Amino acid sequence: MIIVVAITAISSFVVPSAEMNTSLRVIRFPFMFAAASFGYFGIMFCFILLLIHLCKLETFGSPYFAPFAPLQFSDLKDTVIRGPIWKMKTRPKATLPKN
């Protein structure tokens, strides 16, 4: 528990804006409670719940983790490693483009 509280305290200085710091504070307390109650399994369970929640979110009608959450292989060409320009002929399907 002491290590988790120390890591969260140090990581709070990394966030540049106050609005993001407030939202991270809301997330930090359930993680600390889960770590105090169940240890490493509590942290992993809380992280999995957070990941499930983020996968279900949508912003402006498109999935938050697109193209990873609803896996679209055709949209992966410009995510982690940028593909060549000549391969980028189509727009991502997650943004719901109109032709």
Image (cartoon, rainbow, N blue to C red):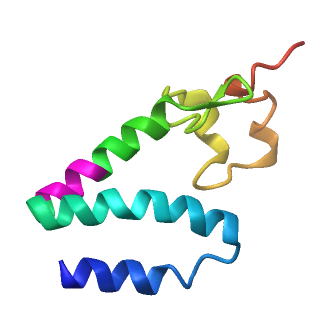
User: Where in the figure is residue 95, as x and y percent of width and height?
Assistant: 74, 27
Above-or-below relation of 75 to 47:
above
- State the predominant SS element of the stretch in magenta: helix
Q: Nearer the viewer, residue 73 or 98?
A: 98
Q: Nearer the viewer, residue 63 or 88?
A: 63
Residue lying at 38% horizontally and 46% vertically, measured from the top left: 50
* In-image side of 5 versus 14 (left or right): left
Above-or-below relation of 4 to 75:
below
Q: Nearer the viewer, residue 94 or 99?
A: 94
Q: Nearer the viewer, residue 51 or 9?
A: 9
Residue lying at 78% horizontally and 37% vertically, measured from the top left: 88
* In-image side of 48 versus 72 (left or right): left
* In-image side of 13 versus 93 (left or right): left
What is the magenta range?
Answer: 41-46
User: Where in the figure is residue 79, as x and y percent of width and height?
Assistant: 62, 48
Residue lying at 32% horizontally and 56% vertically, measured from the top left: 30
Residue lying at 78% horizontally and 29% vertically, measured from the top left: 91
Give the quarter of the image for residue 60.
top right
